[in-house]
Image (cartoon, rainbow, N blue to C red):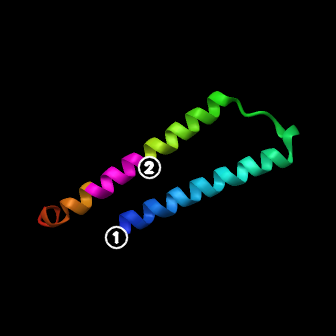
Amino acid sequence: MNHTAARTYRAVHWLTTHLQEGLQEAQRRPDRGDISTTTVIIWVAAVTGAVLIAGTIAVVIAKYNGKLSGL
């Protein structure tokens, strides 16, 4: 696994772990405030977009790595 893919994996792992912990905390303490459905949808879309962009960049860099090294 190359460096970019490893960093992307760590970032995705951290984000999903953080989201799961937040959801578990919300279940344990429902009185801590409501998060609107719209906010959750926006966050999921943002994280998904970031992961897709990072993955695309990793694929492009891996594909053209030899050609980019001469620049």
The quarter of the image holding the N terminus is: bottom left
Picture quadrant where residue 31 is located: top right
Residue shown at 81% from the left, 46% from the top: 27
Using the image as rendered, state which of residue 68 and residue 23 is in the foreground: 23
Report x, y in % for residue 64.
18, 60
Q: Name the residue under label 1.
A: 2
Range shown magenta: 51-59
Using the image as rendered, state which of residue 44 and residue 65 is in the foreground: 44
The quarter of the image holding the C terminus is: bottom left
Residue shown at 34% from the left, 70% from the top: 2
Picture quadrant where residue 14 is located: bottom right
Relative height, residue 71 to residue 48 (above, below): below
Q: Does the magenta stretch include residue 54?
A: yes
Q: Name the residue under label 2.
A: 51
User: Seen in the image, is 32 located left or right of residue 18?
Assistant: right
Relative height, residue 45 to residue 15 (above, below): above
Tell me if mark 1 has few (under 14), some (14-19) or many (20+) residues whose alpha carbon lies within 10 angstroms of its own. few
Q: How many labels does the image show?
A: 2
Query: Identity of the amino acid at label 2?
Result: Val
Label 1 residue SS: loop
User: Seen in the image, is 48 located left or right of residue 32?
Assistant: left
Query: Identity of the amino acid at label 1?
Result: Asn
Q: Does the magenta stretch include residue 22?
A: no
